[in-house]
Image: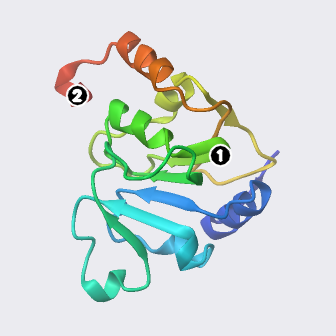
Amino acid sequence: MRQQLSRRDFLRKVRELFNIALIYYPGYGEDNFLEEVFKAEEIVYLDNESGGPISYKANRNYVKGDFGKPPFKDGTFDAIFYQENHADLEETIKMLRTLRRGGIVIHSDDECILQCLDEEDFMRMPGLSKIDLPFSNPRYNIFQKNYPHTTQIFYEFLSRCIIPSNLGYL
């Protein structure tokens, strides 16, 4: 039986285990709990909205932008925090380009109100493997990028996905 941990303890252990020095949080809204585990300079927030009052963003690495066109180099991040994100499949594939080989996606769709990619969607993506840890938190899944991002491979995968356009993915 795996040890159940609080969100904070789970994220701390994941950070230590995978040696996360820089984490990308696309579409974060106004969450700030990552700052309980990471230093402000270790988190890069990206959202297409204002992200709250200026005082709220003052101590953050905040980038206003489109996570379907992330303004970061390939392999920039050790981890992506993908919680309640409303990116479609193509935008998510573009986000994964910014993750280094061996980097991880910390995924949760636990409280997602609108359309979100779920655990099954991530399990089908080429180049990602679900990681089972000896500890867990019921909200999160961990996926590891196991080879360098090749846009062509991901687009071939995307072209094979049959997802109704009325769901907002195409």
Residue receiving disc 2: 167
Q: What kind of element bears circle 2?
A: helix
Residue 24 vs 142, above or below: the answer is below
Q: Could you say where residue 81 lies in the image, as x and y percent from the top left?
A: 51, 54
Amino acid type, callout 2: Leu
For the residue pair 62 and 136, the one nearer the viewer reads as 62
Residue 79: tell me if it is visible: yes
Q: Please tell me in which quadrant of the rendered image residue 94 appears.
A: top left
Pick the quarter of the image with the N terminus.
top right
Q: Please tell me in which quadrant of the rendered image residue 61 appears.
A: bottom left
Q: What kind of element bears circle 1?
A: strand
Question: Among all residues in the image, which is located at the extreme front?
Answer: 73
> Residue at coordinates 71% horizontally, 57% vertically from top-left?
14
> Residue at coordinates 45% horizontally, 49% vertically from top-left?
110
Residue receiving disc 1: 103
Q: Could you say where residue 57 lies in the image, as x and y percent from the top left?
A: 35, 80
If you read the primary sequence from the N terminus, does the residue marked by circle 1 or circle 2 appear first? Answer: 1
> Residue at coordinates 46% horizontally, 26% vertically from top-left?
151
> Residue at coordinates 34% horizontally, 37% vertically from top-left?
91
Residue 2 vs 115, above or below: the answer is below
Q: Could you say where residue 162 lies in the image, as x and y percent from the top left?
A: 33, 12
Q: Gap in Å between the C-alphas at discs 1 and 2?
A: 29 Å
Residue 141: tell me if it is visible: no
